Image: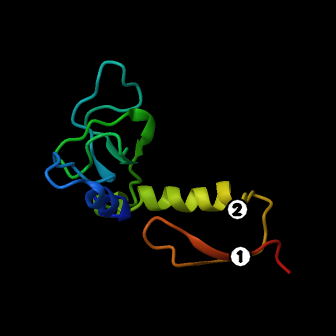
């Protein structure tokens, strides 16, 4: 599991006296069991994912996860490294390909400033001069 700004925002927005929420939205682990409809993973598979704010978070011992938001953990990453990546990697992907609309034909240089914490503020120049 990891801690990121989504955890801080959810915790800060929970009214006092409300039922506590299980935080955590990034994880890497080993599949313990699968449901009868699961086709992509088996018990023992190493996986990683960015969770959903609509479900209990990953700061729990066990997580119920939709296989469609789960992927095989890269063998080159430790569990701690893999758990630190999902939300930040999704943020970077969305910034580059959804917001900046980069393609395989894009050229130039990109400098990303202040990209910590799941939000990206960027200065960029496209195409290269």
Quadrant where the C terminus sits is bottom right
**First in residue order: circle 1 vs circle 2:** 2
Q: How far across and down, in percent of the image, does residue 67 sit?
A: 39, 34
Left or right, 123 with reference to 33: right
Residue drawn at point x = 38 percent, y = 48 percent: 49
Q: Which mark is residue 100?
A: 2
SS class, disc 2: loop
Q: Residue furthest left?
A: 17
Is residue 107 something that shows in the picture? yes
Quadrant of residue 80 within the rendered picture: bottom left
Q: How far across and down, in percent of the image, does residue 87 sit?
A: 43, 57
Per the model, the C-alpha gap separating discs 1 and 2 is 9 Å
Q: How far across and down, in percent of the image, does residue 56 sit?
A: 25, 43
Q: Residue furthest front?
A: 16
Disc 1 target residue: 124
Quadrant of residue 85 within the rendered picture: bottom left
- Count the labels in the image: 2
SS class, disc 1: strand
State yes or no: discs 1 and 2 in contact (Cβ < 8 Å): yes
Q: Residue furthest right?
A: 129
Quadrant where the N terminus sits is bottom left
Is residue 2 something that shows in the picture? no
Residue drawn at point x = 82 percent, y = 77 percent: 128
Residue drawn at point x = 66 percent, y = 54 percent: 98
- Give neighbour class at mark 1: few <14, some 14-19, many 20+ (Cα, 10 Å): some
């Amino acid at each position: 599991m990891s801690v990121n700004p989504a955890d801080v925002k959810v915790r800060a927005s929970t009214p006092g006296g409300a039922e506590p929420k299980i935080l955590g939205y990034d994880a890497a682990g080993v599949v313990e069991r699968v449901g009868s409809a699961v086709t992509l993973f088996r018990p023992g598979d190493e996986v990683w994912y960015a969770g959903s704010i609509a479900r209990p978070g990953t700061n729990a011992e066990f997580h119920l996860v939709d296989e469609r938001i789960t992927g095989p953990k890269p063998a080159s990453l430790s569990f701690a490294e893999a758990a630190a990546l999902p939300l930040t990697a999704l943020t970077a992907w969305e910034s580059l390909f959804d917001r900046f609309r980069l393609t395989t034909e894009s050229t130039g240089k990109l400098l990303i400033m202040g990209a910590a914490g799941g939000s990206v503020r960027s200065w960029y120049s496209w195409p290269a001069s």
